[in-house]
Structures are given as structure tokens and as C-alpha cells.
Image (cartoon, helix red, strand yellow):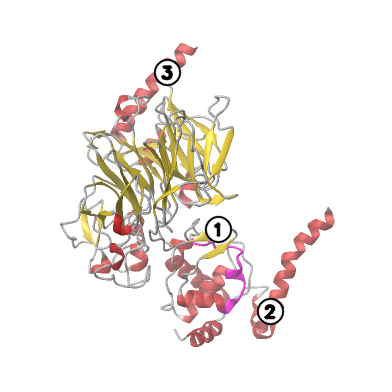
Amino acid sequence: MKKLIIVLLLSPFCFLLMAQTKQKPKAKAASTKAKPVPSAAAKASAANGLKVFTQTCISCHQADGGGVPRMNPPLIKTPWVLGDQARLIKIVLNGFKEDVEINGDYYSNVMPSFAYLKDQDIADVLTYVRSNFGNKASAITVKQVTVARTANGK
Amino acid sequence: MKKTTIKTSVVLAALAGSALFFAAKPAPPKNAKSVKAADESGLKLPSGFSALIVADNLGQARHIAVTSSGDIYVKINRARNGKGILMLHDKNGDGKADDITGFGTYGGTGMAIKNGYLYASSDENVYRYKLDNQQHVIDGTKPEEIVHGLLSRHEHESKSITLDNAGNIYVNVGAYSNSCQKEDRQKGSMGRNPCPILDSAGGIWQFKADKLNQTYGDGTHYAMGLRNVVGLDWNQQDNQLFVMQHGRDQLHDIFPDMYTVQQSAILPAECMYAIKKGDDAGWPYLYYDQIQKKKILAPEYGGDGKKEGSAKAISPVIAFPGHLAPNGLLFYTGNQFPARYKNGAFIAFHGSWNRAPEPQAGYFVVFVPFENGRPNTEGKWEVFADNFAGSPDKVKSGRADHRPCGLAQGPDGSLYVSDDSKGTIYKISYNNK
């Protein structure tokens, strides 16, 4: 029984570690610096992330990131938020109109494009979403957004 | 002891009644104070009323219909274990369903009993099932398809239904858009003019209740300019269709320079309309502002929050604060409740989401007294059944335990309420005779 608990406790860590190692080469310097004491830049990013979230995301995804049943999907512990970062950035740039099942539920409302947001705002708000509501995923950098936007053409 | 209890409750009922009557307008919290937590249901009801939980955990219980012997048909939004309609039966007479059976493989919302048939809708079609003289479905595997091919494109899919006394069924086809913008819900995107959605959605269609295989061309485009109607009912007193419209969302998100977050939380009104054939309620070109008491031109069509829209659009008979999401409408024709409830309207408000970051609201059943087919005290309404959410904090956060959706009247005059969040069915009765 104890073993099981330890395995269960550890498994999310492994997942995070694995996810972390994948992108280590790119984000190494930033992430080691940011870990122990948040830098001024990280603090500014978190504050701006919250501001952008409150201005643009909250009415659909709600203050707790839990979304609205059957209408607007939750941002909590879903691979759409925690997984492929380029895909996540593209959703913000292009909006989202697909019929998608998340944990057994479907969500019907259309998400419009937020391509009008600055790259910095998109990076900050996605970093905010990925590190709040119980999510513990790495930051999204401005560079990632700029690269994704160029590839996306919008 | 018993006598005193009864006396006290009569006094309480009278007090609560008068408090409700005077406090009615838009002050739901005050109303809540004058009522008590009734019983195991956790609902707060006016004195003299109590609620029973008939069934629980049924899935997304949308609209409901009650038979002449008190059995309940429940339409489930997404079929569970291949069953989209449940029948609840109470074998031992304790008021709780102890025999639950199911049929109908499709999900959906609409559920009604009329003239020997059970009517049910998926998000595209309307079906009916022949009933025996106990009002039990004879063969759940063989529905007749009355209407097919109604549009269902992500938003506002529910095909709610009601029937008149002349052999017609009325079906809502919700608009697959918030405000008919070029880009749905996109900040600053202007409205399409004319709005191409209106020829096949955003209105009510009338079909023959006994004719098979109908679709758009076979029916009558009965009313237009209704964004989405989930609650609708035929008013027996003045023989007319009444509908509850879900008003548009996101005035602030889309036009932040024109509307504050606070304005956007309460505007536009959720409207009750009395519908005549050919009526146009004005969506998407205008919305009803319950504070200015005017039909306001939508910002997508050049409005600024003040300019009025076309005078041709009908006005609501009563307007409620924004985003409360009216999902059920029922005109009470029973004799069990006190006389003031007779012919009045009960409305199940599913509760808001579009008010964030302002606190959410709703998650209650409202009552509007009627006289001669119209609300008898202009603009007055009162919260009848409250605390579906479980606590005031759960109302504010929108994380409600239960969300009222469907309404039905039992043969004894009790009021049934469905909850499509946890799948609870409530039976509300008046015991204080």
C-alpha cells in the first residue's frame, strides 16, 4: 500500500521531469535562475499574465481556470495546456473551433482569435495559465510566441 | 405541539408571503432571507413548501414530463449507457423513484407529453412515442420521427419543444453564434448584415405534432430574432406561446470601450416574450436593456449602448438581469399551491457564467404572478426556490452543486425541477393547507 502511494506521488514528478528534460537545452539558463527566488522579470511576467488573463480569458475560462461545463473547456491539468507548447500558442493566435473531448465532456463555444495580443502578453498569460490552477508546467517565452506566430502567418 | 407548529407556520407563511410580494423586484438576496432551508433537499422555499429528492445522479437531466400517475420522463443531454430518456417510477409510494428504466439512444433536451404521445428531441430531430392508457411508452425502440435535419452547430444546440391545443409543436432552433459577428465572439468584429443565420436558426419553428418526416420547408417559421430559447411553454389561459430568451454574451469582451465589466455582467436582459406568429424579437440587431427599459442597437450593428434599435421588434413582457440563463418555463395550472400561484410563471434559471470576473448569479427557480395572461405587477418577480448551488460562495464562483433546468407539473399539482449538473430531480409541494 505504502509503495503504491509513493509511486502515485512520484509519477506526476516523473512526468514533469520528463517534460522538463525535453526542453532543457533551450530554457536551461532561464529556468535555473528563476527557480529559487523569482527574478524581477518573472514577477513582472506573473503580474502581467494575471492582468491579461483577467482582461481577456476570465469571462469564459473563469477565475479558477475551471471553465464552464459543456461550454468553455477547463485549463486545469489538461494536455491542451500542459502538452505541446506550439499547439497551445497557436490556439491563442487562431482561436479554437473544433469539437473537443476533455475528460469525457464536450465544449461547444467558439474561442475567437487573440492574435491582437502582443507576443509578450501571450507569453505571460500562457505562463500564468501553465503555473496556476494546480498546473505546474514551464514558462512560455516571448521567443516561442514570436516563432509560432511567424510559422502561423498571423 | 402540532397545533402551535401549524399556527406558527401560518404566521410565517403570511409574513414570508407579504415579504416576497413587496421585496420582489431585482433583489433576490432579500427574498432568500424570508425563506427557510426546507428539508433534506437543501432548497430554500417559501414557508409552507417543502421539497423531496425524487432521484439523484441521473446524468445531465434536461427537460422533464410527468404522467397522470406521477411517473417522470427525463431527457438526458448525453445518453448514458445508451439511454437518452429515463422513466422514474415510485413503487412503494414514498415519493422516491425506486424503479428507473431507460430507452432512446440519443441525447437532447426536449420532453413533453400531449394527446397520448411522449415527445422528445435530440439536437437535430424531434421524435414521439405512443403511450398506453397508463401514459407509459409502448415501445421505446420505435419512435416516430416528426422533424429531422434541424441545424446544430456547436452553440445553442438544444431543440426545446412545447405543444399547443391545436395539434402543433413548437421547436426552438438556437442561433449558432453569439451576436452574428463576422468572427464569432471576436473582439471588435462587426455584425453580418443581414444576418444569414436567421433563415434557419435563431427562432421558433412550428410543425404538425402528428406528421412524420417534416423539416424546415414543411414547418412555419413562427418567430424570429430569438438568439436561443431553452425554456418555453404554451400559456393555456390566453392560448399563446411564451418563450424565455438567453440574451447575448460578452458586451465588454467584444466592445471594451463601450461597456464596463460591471455593465457587461448585468446586460442585456434575459427576456420573457409572449409570441404571436410572425413576431421578431430583434436578435442580433438589438438587445433589451432592463435598466434603460429600451431596445438598444447592438454594438456590432453600430450601437453605442444608447442608440435604440428597430421599433418593429417586439418588447419583452418581463425582463430579468443578464446571463441568468432561463432554461425552463412553466405556467402553473394546478390547485395544490396557494391561489396566487395559479396561472403564474415558474422559471428555472440555470445560473450565469458570463459575469466573471464579477460574481455569478442565478441557480434558482423564480415565480412571476400572472393575471389574464400577463405579469400582474409590472416587472415584479420573486425567487421561489433557492440554494440549488449549495452556498452563497458557490453562487458567486459559479461552482454550483446543482443547476435547475427543466420544470414540470405533477398530477397532484406539485412542481418538479430537474438539475442537469448532478442529475437530481426535485419535487416541490405545498403542505401548509
Q: What label does residue A105 carry, if any?
A: 1
Residue type indicated by callout 1: Asp
- Say if B189 sits above or below A133 in the image: below
In the foreground, A52 or B385: B385
Q: CA distance from mark 3 to mark 2?
A: 70 Å
Q: Is residue B242 magenta?
A: no
Q: Give the class, few, some or many, for how many residues have Cα within 10 Å of label 2's Cα (few <14, many ≥20).
A: few
The chain under label 1 reads: A
Please give the residue where the numbered disc 3 appears in the rendered image: B8
Task: Give percent across and percent down for residue B335.
Answer: 35, 24
Q: Is residue A84 magenta?
A: yes
In the foreground, B163 or B231: B163
Is residue A108 visible in the rendered image? The answer is yes
Is B379 placed left or right of B253 in the picture? Answer: left
Can marks 3 and 2 be said to lie on one chain? no
Q: Please state which of the two labelled residues, at mark 3 or mark 1, is closer to the viewer.
A: 1
